[in-house]
Image: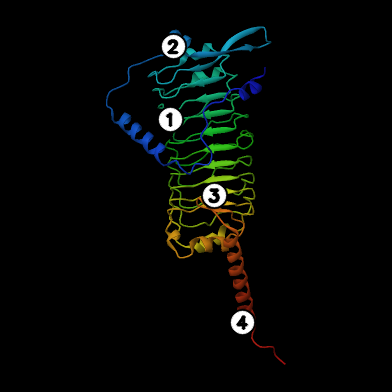
């Protein structure tokens, strides 16, 4: 069985990509992390041991030419580990969970060239940089102290989770190397710009709970279907390019959009079907839902409610009246015909 086929039989915990009810998780993690960072004591050195390996290894599989066997899954989370140097000797590992330890260095993973799945959440890492791992498909470095996105070049990587770190800008994500990346999770960082996310194969992009004021530099995301921008500081929808031709779901909840006229700037997104605008000032306007549908006729759902046929019919009538008024105004501006 190949490394890639084997991944299909292994189902690590995945969060639902439609994250409308995600209010508590980040806050809880942030509180835990602040409490931990406030501790003045140094962590005692705790290296990974052979006994821990024996306890954490599972999933016996064939290796190499199929004549030998080795355990390919390791779980050593919540062991207060500060050193995983021992992993260099376990080159057949494919699934590794080293989350919720005190690790500052995971360079030993560079020796695991068969690695398919990695979870290193809740450590003290300042970088997600590793040597290129040819089979790595899912990598999670959530809730560390990572400050940049440099050194991530795995060609088969499809899901990258960097939420809850200290990243201010996205740099180094090379579309010629990350040719398989379809889901990028950057929620709960310190991003001030969306420039640098130039990944044409990307389908799901999660940027909630950052410091974004606008969207920019996403013109090349032609395959993007889900864009999550909840709880930022966005007050204008300038920057949404018509090149986002596959975008179906846009979450702008908890931003600072005050004028519904801003919706005219996203009416050129041909496949947009679901829009979330809850907790924006514009939602207090009279006939908010109706006006949104007038501006974006292809919408099927606004916030958590689907539009009914009568809503659509009424919006069509308003749109038609607006067109007629515009035509009359245009004729009036031309003045009477001259003899």
| Residue with the most extreme bottom position | 339
Give the spatial CA distance, label 2 vs label 4. 82 Å
In space, the residues marked 3 and 2 are separated at their CA atoms by 44 Å
Q: Which residue is mark 3?
A: 250
Residue position for label 1: 126
Alpha carbons under labels 2 and 1: distance apart:
25 Å
User: Mark 1 to mark 4: distance in Å?
Assistant: 62 Å
Q: Residues within 10 Å of mark 2 (few under 14, many from 20)?
A: some
List x then y, in percent, for residue 175: 62, 38
Measured as percent of width and height from the top left, residue 72 is found at 56, 15
**85 left or right of 93?**
left
Give the mark count: 4
Residue labelled with disc 2: 52
User: Is the Cβ of the residue at disc 3 closer than 8 Å to that at disc 2?
Assistant: no
Q: Residues within 10 Å of mark 4 (few under 14, many from 20)?
A: few
Which of 294/164 is in front? 294
Badge 1: few (under 14), some or many (20 or more) residues near its Cα, within 10 Å? some
* Residue bearing the label numbered 4: 333
Residue at position x 27%, y 26% in the image: 40
């Amino acid at each position: 069985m190949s490394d890639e086929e084997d991944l299909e039989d292994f189902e690590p915990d995945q969060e639902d990509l439609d994250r409308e009810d995600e209010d508590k998780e980040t806050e809880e993690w942030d509180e835990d992390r602040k409490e931990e960072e406030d501790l003045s004591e140094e962590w005692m050195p705790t290296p990974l041991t052979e006994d821990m390996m024996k306890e954490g290894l599972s999933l016996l599989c064939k290796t190499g030419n199929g004549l030998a066997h080795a355990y390919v899954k390791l779980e050593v989370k919540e062991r207060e580990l500060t050193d995983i140097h021992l992993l260099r000797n376990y080159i057949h590992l494919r699934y590794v969970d080293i989350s919720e330890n005190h690790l500052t260095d995971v360079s030993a993973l560079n020796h695991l060239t068969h690695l398919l799945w990695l979870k290193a959440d809740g450590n003290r890492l300042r970088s997600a940089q590793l040597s290129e791992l040819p089979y790595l498909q899912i990598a999670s470095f959530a809730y560390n102290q990572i400050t940049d996105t440099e050194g991530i070049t795995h060609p088969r990587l499809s899901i990258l989770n960097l939420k809850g770190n200290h990243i201010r800008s996205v740099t180094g994500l090379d579309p010629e190397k990350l040719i398989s990346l379809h889901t990028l999770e950057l929620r709960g960082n310190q991003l001030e710009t969306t420039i640098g996310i130039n990944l044409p194969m990307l389908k799901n992009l999660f940027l909630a709970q950052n410091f974004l004021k606008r969207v920019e530099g996403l013109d090349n995301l032609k395959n993007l279907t889900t864009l999550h921008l909840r709880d930022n500081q966005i007050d204008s929808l300038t920057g949404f390019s018509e090149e986002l031709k596959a975008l179906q779901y846009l979450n702008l909840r908890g931003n600072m959009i005050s004028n519904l006229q801003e919706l005219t700037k996203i009416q050129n997104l041909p496949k947009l079907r679901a829009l979330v605008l809850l907790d924006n000032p514009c939602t207090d306007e009279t006939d908010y839902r109706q006006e949104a549908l007038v501006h974006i006729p292809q919408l099927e759902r606004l916030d958590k409610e689907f539009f009914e046929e009568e809503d659509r019919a009424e919006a069509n009538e308003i749109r038609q009246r607006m067109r007629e008024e515009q035509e009359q105004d245009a004729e009036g501006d031309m003045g009477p015909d001259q003899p």
